[in-house]
Image (cartoon, helix red, strand yellow):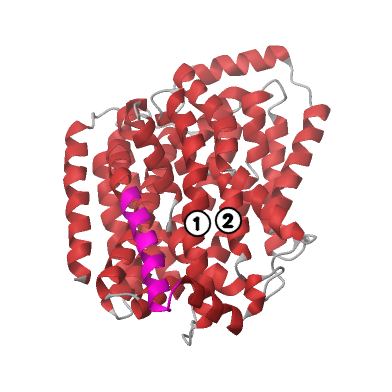
Amino acid sequence: MNWVILGIYFALFIVISVIAYKKTRNTPEDFFLAGRSLGPLVYFLSFAATNFSAFFFLGFAGASWQFGLGQYGIMGVGTALVPVSFYFIGRKVWKLGREKGYLTAPELLAGEFASPLLRIIVFAVMVVFTLPYLFTQALGAGMILSSLAGADITKISAVIVILLIGGFVALTGMRGTAWTDVMQGGIMIVAMITAVVFISKGLGGFCQAGLKAFNSSPEHFMRPGPQGFFTPLKWLSFIILWSLVNPLFPQLFTRFYTAKSIKSLKASAWLYPLLICFLFLAPVLVGVWARGTKLNFTNPDMVLPTMVSNYAPSWVHALVMTGALAALISTAVAQLLALSTMLTNDLGIKKNKVLIGRILTMGLCFIVIGFVFAGFGSAGIFTTLVKTTFSGLIALTPSTIAALYFKKISPLAPILSIIAGEVSVVLIWLKILPVFGLIDGIVAFLVSLLVLVIAAFVFRPKVGLEQSAKQEMSQ
């Protein structure tokens, strides 16, 4: 039954992919952005599926097993606020994309500030800090297939899945990505709800599951948690982090350009918080309930797969693992496409963009495979992403907001802001810069914001040079 359900999923995936491939035109705008034609329903489900990754299915349950029920507060509430920043940023990005033909975030910032150097810096930051996130999807796929097989085939499974994903992206582009997201979004929602229902039943019901966990570790039900993790500053840090970093994920920033109209953005801004507040509770409950069992976990990312395999029927285990696979595949597909879009568009390639984008997509897959065999990310998906991708990308937020709302400042301001933010991330990694009870990303954000404000006042743009630069950027 395990492989039958997985086989049905891949069969549906292939059918939709073939249809999307036949509909995709061989133009950069259609291949990379689906012709900017996604309506409200497809846009919302694609947006949600892209944001639900291995981090959601595996990382959340592992984090709540480690740190407690407070994980729902910082994840559910914080992520539910994301649409506020999505609308605040996304509306302007969508409008500028329509007016000026932008395809990527580096192109937008460079175009609005008339700075080719800024384009290179933003491009480098997005590529470097998205690769760890993409790697966690491959690693998550390996864990899921290992759970289904009942054997440790993590690395070989990760390699196979990332190559299959790369082939899919190279053939179908954004249209195939969005269409399969509709299917995958539905699968992952059903899978997570099913997991909670059957695991609770296997533990004797919701009340018994919670009571056993409370009797075993009451610290998991109160603040600051068993490891003193949930301090007020940590709560505030994570809520700010989720709200501000999500729009800067390349795979989500690109989604702003794909909307057919502003209605698509508005619908997502309303629907996403409702889905998040309900759905994000599920993996957190499973992680906390695991404290009431006799199961031992050496890897927190395996909490959900192990709980399902021990306390639910085998077909539920197969369905949930398929849902988890759908979640990470949807994210990995979007990340690969976003990275190949930037590599093709922001490196000055003029001809055969679609063909080169397809080749670069497969090249990125081999870089991820290198990460897999190097053993990167052994700290767990949650910790890996908080300390790498999230910290690096949130340093771009002040400059992005400036490009959308305060574009008359000197381009030196965002350049220095981003450099300062990324330097602070490195200094935190090296334990040279303290975080003062905050998380790494918030310190990087505050540093980049402070430098942006100071530089904006110190360096005044010269109107003549600015106009000349903008003319050069438009050519």
Q: In which quadrant is the N terminus drawn? A: bottom left
**Residue 437 image-quadrant placement:** bottom right
Residue 422 is a magenta residue: no
Q: Is residue 351 something one can see in this rendering? A: no
- Where residue 95 sits in the image (x, y, percent)? 50, 21
Question: Which residue in the structure is indicated by mark 1?
Answer: 280
Q: Residue furthest bottom?
A: 294
Question: Which residue in the structure is indicated by mark 2?
Answer: 75
Q: How crowded is mark 1: few (under 14 residues within 10 Å), some or many (20 or more)?
A: many
Marks 2 and 1: in contact by CB < 8 Å?
yes
Q: Which residue is at the front of the view, 45 or 200?
A: 200
Secondary structure at numbered mark 1: loop
Q: Which residue is at the front of the view, 184 or 177?
A: 184
Q: Residue 35 carries which label?
A: none
User: Which residues fall within the magenta stretch?
Assistant: 185-205
Name the amino acid type tagged 2. Met
User: Is residue 255 placed above or below 241 in the rendered structure?
Assistant: above
Q: Which residue is painted at 63% across and 41% down in the image?
A: 396
